[in-house]
Structure formats: C-alpha cells, structure tokens
Amino acid sequence: MVFINFRGVELRHAFISHLVAAFEQHRINFFIDKDEQKGRDLKHLFKRIKESHIALAIFSRRYAQSKWCLNELVKIKKLADNKKLKVVPIFYKVKVGDVRHQKGEFGRNFWKLAKASTGEEIKKWKEALEFVSSKMGLPLGNKRYSS
C-alpha cells in the first residue's frame, strides 16, 4: 500500500486528484485521509502508515502549517529508519533546500507553527524534514501542469 502524506487544503483538488486517478487506473492500493472516518485520532493514521510499503511525502508551501502532516512525517521517518517503509519526497512548487532547512515561504509557515509547539515536537519535525528531503525525490515546479 502507498500512504500519501500531504497538506489537503492546497493539493486535494489539484495534484492529488490526478495522482489518485492514476493509482486507481493502475490498481495501485493507496491510502488517503479522505477515506478515513472523521474524528479519528492520529494513532489510526499511524496504523495506516505502518501497514504501507511506500510513503509519498508531498511537500508544498502550506505543508508546514499542519501539525498532522508533520507528525505523520515523523512516523514515516521512524519506519524508514528501520527499513520498514520506503519514502519518496515530492516537492510541489517548493525548493528542496527550503524544506530541508525550513526557509522561504515553507520555512515561514514552519516557524509560525513552531511558535505554538514544544521544543521536542520542533526537534522531531526538523529531523524528519531533513531526513526525507535528503532522499531522491521528484520536484514539480511552476512550469508543469499538476497532472
């Protein structure tokens, strides 16, 4: 199964809809949060991550506004560290370095969220962002169509 980690508000009806259509067409088993019952806690999403073989971490400008996205990424990193999950980063209209070093618009969103977070959370998020963004990934810039 492929777990798709992304900031929904920005990508759900654009890039993600095309990705989901392609996965369905090719009968690739995937998990996306819209398939989940509302009101469930993060532990259930962690279970879905653990059941997966691959995780796509789709970084966008607003990704770092979400504690949920970042906490999922921490879990993804932990499983990848233990060779139980392969992770592929996708950089959707953001620079790899901005994600890795929390700079640019991505960084501003990260540090704004960090102000309302604990030091331990921030440390784990930074480690996960640095780890995942150092993997071979796919940059999708402004000059490409989202499909």
Image (cartoon, rainbow, N blue to C red):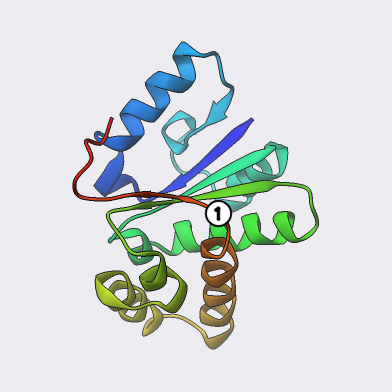
Side of 128 where 15 appears, left or right: left
| Front-lying residue, 28 or 141 | 141
Q: Which residue is mark 1?
A: 136
- Could you say which quadrant of the image residue 80 lies in? bottom right
- Could you say which quadrant of the image residue 105 lies in? bottom left
Give above or below for 87 relative to 12: below
Name the residue at 43% across, 78% down. Answer: 101
- Residue 41, horizontal then vertical, whole percent: 55, 50
- Residue 30, horizontal then vertical, whole percent: 55, 28
Query: At label 1, which amino acid type do we have?
Result: Met
Name the residue at 42% across, 20% down. Answer: 22
Name the residue at 25% across, 33% down. Answer: 13
Side of 75 where 145 appears, left or right: left
- Quadrant into which the C terminus falls: top left
- Quadrant into which the N terminus falls: top right
Figure disc tally: 1
Give above or below for 33 relative to 120: above
Side of 112 where 82 appears, left or right: right
Give above or below for 96 relative to 11: below
- Residue 52, horizontal then vertical, whole percent: 67, 37
Crowdedness near tag 1: few (<14), some (14–19) or many (≥20) residues, C-alpha within 10 Å: few
Q: Secondary structure at mark 1?
A: loop
Name the residue at 51% across, 80% down. Answer: 122
